Amino acid sequence: MKRLIKFLLIMTFCAGLFVSFAWAEDARKSPDVTEEQELKFKKNLKKWEKLTDKQKKVIKEKYHAWGKLSPEQKKAVKEKLREYKMLSKEEKQRLRMNFAEFRKLPPHERKAILTNYNKWNKLSFEERREIRNKLRKWKKLSPEQKKELRRKLKKFRRLPPKKREEIIKKHRKKKLKQKRRR
């Protein structure tokens, strides 16, 4: 997610610059340029000129990466950008700070976070709600209860896969019976 936010921020900047450059090409051919368009182009050109060669290179790479995205991917990025623009200043600041912290993490930790994020996004609404409810229950447990649950989980993870599957099936059946009784 954070990688996407960085990408969006860079793409927003790039889009402004490259739209201005593309507009400049068209402006030479068309006399229908508004004063507002011309001012925007000049503003973006000044920003571009202030960038280092390294920054320009990164922007060009991102621009080329954008060109390789499918229409669906571009649509998804634009939607995330739209959502980002709707955030308050405080939310944007918090997002940037979280992203900065994320970038400081070792690569294996970042990868684990992104993997979990992708898993979370694939869950149904019901599955997410169930996880949130379990987290609320967890937070209410005493330190002793948490310790005992951790011990049981550690023991469960050591079981052979077939035995774990049996236990999970029994637990699901029990849950279904409880739901039917309600």
Image: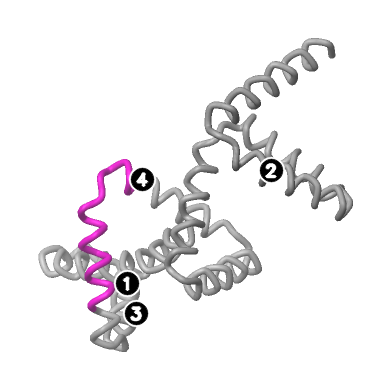
The first of marks 2 and 3 along the sequence is 3
At label 3, the amino acid type is Lys
- Residue displayed at 76% across by 13% down: 177
Q: Nearer the viewer, mark 4 or mark 1?
A: 4
Q: Which residue is mark 4?
A: 75
- Residue displayed at 38% across by 63% down: 7
Q: Which residue is mark 3?
A: 43
The C terminus is located in which quarter?
A: top right
At label 2, the amino acid type is Leu
- State the CA–CA distance, disc 3 to disc 4: 27 Å
Most extreme residue toward the top is: 180
At label 4, the amino acid type is Lys
At label 1, the amino acid type is Glu
The first of marks 3 and 1 along the sequence is 1
Main SS class of the magenta portion in the image: helix
- Residue displayed at 75% across by 40% down: 134
Q: Which residue is mark 1?
A: 35
The first of marks 4 and 1 along the sequence is 1
- State the CA–CA distance, disc 4 to disc 1: 30 Å
The local secondary structure at tag 3 comes to helix
Q: Nearer the viewer, mark 3 or mark 4?
A: 4
Q: Position of residue 171 (x, y in %)?
A: 70, 23
Q: Are marks 2 and 4 in contact (CB under 8 Å)?
A: no
Q: Are marks 2 and 3 in contact (CB under 8 Å)?
A: no
The local secondary structure at tag 1 comes to helix
Q: Nearer the viewer, mark 3 or mark 1?
A: 3
The local secondary structure at tag 2 comes to helix
Q: Which residues are magenta?
A: 57-74
